[in-house]
Image (spheres, grey):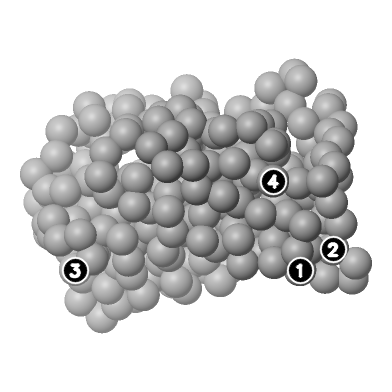
Amino acid sequence: MDSKLHILLCEDEESLGMLVREYLQAKGYNAELFLDGEAGFKAFTRGKYDMCLLDVMMPKMDGFTLAKEIRMLNADIPIIFLTAKNLKDDILEGFKLGADDYLTKPFSMDELVYRMEAILRRVRGKGQNKVTRYIMGKFTFDTQRQLLTIGNKQTKLTTKESELLSLLCANANEVLEREMALKTIWIVDNYFNARSMDVYITKLRKHLKDDPSIEINNVHGKGYRLIVPSIGGESV
């Protein structure tokens, strides 16, 4: 693990925040704690961070609002929500904002670090034969820059959108099994992550609607199939 990784930690319960910060520092991370969302956002605008851990219920600026503001400045930085809430709507709202994961309090510190490291490996890892560009129908998909281009129109994808579209392209015109996609991108296969993936599939369909020949179909009981008339890829 890279000991230079910087973590933005926003948690209004000071005792818990200090405990998480100390644990992360013991694991080699450089973690900075802020007790409200407004202070966290100011810090984000001044510093350089590799990941954000955001409590949902905070004074001055809640975690969801903070995540929106952060995403406007950096669409790719991984975000994990730390929440006392266990309501489906709250968790789905977090995923709609582009969250990479969530943990419900009380949580295991070991599990937190495991999830952080899994996300960071996925975001930062670069395979030797990784496809860097797909030509799919009328679209060009740059997997490294996370850009989807058709004509003069460019769409910047979030990390999750890019990872999911990459999997669909790698399995173009074949079934992408739901369980495999969940374990590859979300690490854990559960109800909330499955619902989150449905949200991202809907987003990708909207991004791809400018080429009517491309579809993402549900395959009942199995997963999804990217239907594309032609596709090619370039690898590093």
Taking 103 as reference, is 167 above or below it?
above
- Quadrant position of residue 168: top right
Most extreme residue toward the right is: 151
State the count of labels.
4
Most extreme residue toward the bottom is: 60
Instruction: Report the residue marked by disc 1.
Output: 210
Give me the C-alpha separation between circle 4 and circle 2: 17 Å
| Image location of residue 46, percent across then percent down | 53, 65
Comparing marks 1 and 4, which lies closer to the viewer?
4
Instruction: Report the residue marked by disc 3.
Output: 57
Does the residue at mark 1 contact the one at mark 4 (Cβ under 8 Å)?
Answer: no
| Mark 2 residue type | Ile
Q: Is residue 119 visible?
A: no
Does the residue at mark 2 contact the one at mark 1 (Cβ under 8 Å)?
Answer: yes
Does the residue at mark 3 contact the one at mark 2 (Cβ under 8 Å)?
Answer: no
Give me the C-alpha separation between circle 1 and circle 4: 14 Å
| Image location of residue 196, percent across then percent down | 38, 53
- Quadrant position of residue 125: top right
Instruction: Report the residue marked by disc 4.
Output: 227
Comparing marks 3 and 4, which lies closer to the viewer?
4
Comparing marks 2 and 1, which lies closer to the viewer?
1
Q: Secondary structure at mark 4?
A: strand
Mark seen at residue 150: 2
**In percent of the image, x 38 and y 70: which residue is there?**
66
Q: Residues within 10 Å of mark 1 (few under 14, many from 20)?
A: some
User: Which comes sooner in the sequence, label 1 or label 4?
Assistant: 1
Comparing marks 1 and 3, which lies closer to the viewer?
1
Q: Is residue 100 visible?
A: yes
